[in-house]
Amino acid sequence: KKIIVRKARDKEKVLGLDGKNYELDENMLVISDSKNAQAIAGVIGSETSGITDSTKEILLESAIFNPKNIRSTRQKLNITTESSYRFERGTTWDNCDTASKRAICLLIEYADAKFITRNDVYPEKIKKETISLRIDRLNSILSTELDRKEIAEILTSLGMEIEPRQENFLVRPPTHRVDINEEIDLIEEVARIKGYENIPIKVCATSIPLYNIPQPVLDLQNIVRNFLLSQGFYETINYGFNKEDDYLKLKSHSFEKVPVEIENPLSKETQFLRISLLPELLKNLITNIDSQFEDIKLFEVGKVFFVENGNTKETNMLGIIATGNITHHHWKYKSQKIDFSYFNGLIQTLLKNELNLSYDMSKNPSKLFNPIESAICSYLDGTIIASYGLLNSEFHPKIKKDIYFAEINLEFIAEKYSYKKTFVPYPLFPKSKRDISIIVPENISYSEITREISKCETDELKITPELFDVYCGKNIPEKTKSLGIALNFQHTKKTLTDEEVNKKTEEILSKLSKFGISLRKF
């Protein structure tokens, strides 16, 4: 005895007219009686609401639904019907009433039906808003010289109400014209009725400025692209938006940037300008995994947006994501899995060899990454230029794979990167090598040690440290570690003597002693 329009209950099930069961969620709309849903609103009726040869009484329902809701419901249920096709494109209030009356007339005329009663629930009638139309604006866009009388005749012939206002018109379109909402829509209607063939062709009198990406940024992006493509990566291009769930997920893992929220988003999927390249790259990776791809290496060059001191900032970033094996399966060779050693080497090669950057490495404090298999690279002034490592499994609980991700600040690197290639001659004199084993407090990083060693260099003497051993355990004091480092001494103008090498080694050990570092005694 009742018709109720309500939101579906979570996991509520409806048996459709097509014989299929549909499981609904709380965002879907249903038409219900006092007990059960009789139709998925705007999409499909239930089997219990169907008509058979024995049907004697029919209830007609004519309604208007939100197009966004119908489209969302149809996509989630993976169904397309004539009803959803019409409703998701928008219908009007007056057509709803007209259609109802026409259907009743047809049933009476052709099916010998008897009309019983009609109930109209329409609490507040909606009228189209008026639109201001500027005559000079219309003629400017169309390159015409139409007068007020001709414009008024065209618009009134289309069922529009015209109210003159000085040099302009206030125009109220008919309610069935849902496509007319702005001044430019009215101008389009005038052009359509006047005839496009009657609109004169004029060449644009002003030059159109081109959007030029600064050359340093463009060059840097090309270097990065070429390097990653040579390493077997594929480039992706995503929309510059994140949904709220993406941001909240990042925030729960100590992501500190404040997002830029869009005031009038087209959907929940585009509620924020993207604050990181990670969410979309992770979706790309999941899509490939769902398509049965196992070895996936992707990257994206794009901008991220965030709020800083009340202002919106945008930064060019590079995102890299990878999982599976380094190379595809080959019958002759055993594939090597992507691990932190490979991924770290990839980032170091890009920053050091390709971009010739000087930086310090340290532990990555971000909860996005595994605390052991991750790192950050900081420029000499402390600015973080790269954050990378093994993604925390809590960030992708449905994917039972190791996923490595890196985000690199190309905006900052473009300011520091030198595009001049300097030739360095091959050394003419042999290098000298000393191996040292040192006891290091556990809070001292290897990058601090290498930075201190570099202070002992001169213009003619280069010292290259190489870490070959790390040991913790027996015969090592608590809260310390043992590092084995090979020191390579290379002079550009002479062969170093043992005395000179030993003296420089003592100088290095002296500088390291201020960190509480000492030679290991065996």
Image: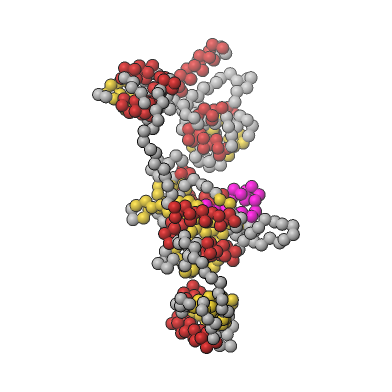
Q: Where is residue 117 in the image (x, y as percent from the top left)?
A: 47, 18
Up/down of 146 relative to 25, above or below: above
Task: Name the colouring of the figure.
Answer: secondary structure
Residue 58 located left or right of residue 201: right
Q: Nearer the viewer, residue 250 or 116?
A: 250
Q: Residue at x 45, y 82 (%)?
A: 511
Q: Residue furthest right?
A: 332
Which quadrant would the C terminus be assigned to in this image? bottom right
- Residue in view at x 58 percent, y 54 percent: 229
Q: Is residue 297 magenta?
A: yes
Relative depth, front residue between 361 and 176: 361
Q: Give the range drawn in magenta.
A: 285-300
Residue 163 visible in rendering: yes
Q: Is residue 38 left or right of residue 134?
A: right
Count of picture labels: 0
Residue 377 x/y as whole percent: 48, 65
492 or 82: which is nearer to us?
A: 492
Judging depth in this view, the residue of 173 and 118 nearest the camera is: 173
In percent of width and height, residue 46 lies at 58, 30
Q: In this view, does 134 lie to the left or right of 464?
A: left
Residue depicted at x 54% and y 11%:
109
- Which residue shows up at 42% across the image and 51% down it? 214
Q: Position of residue 54 (x, y in %)?
A: 63, 20
Q: Is-magenta flag for residue 185?
A: no
Q: In the rendered image, which quarter is residue 185 located in?
A: top left
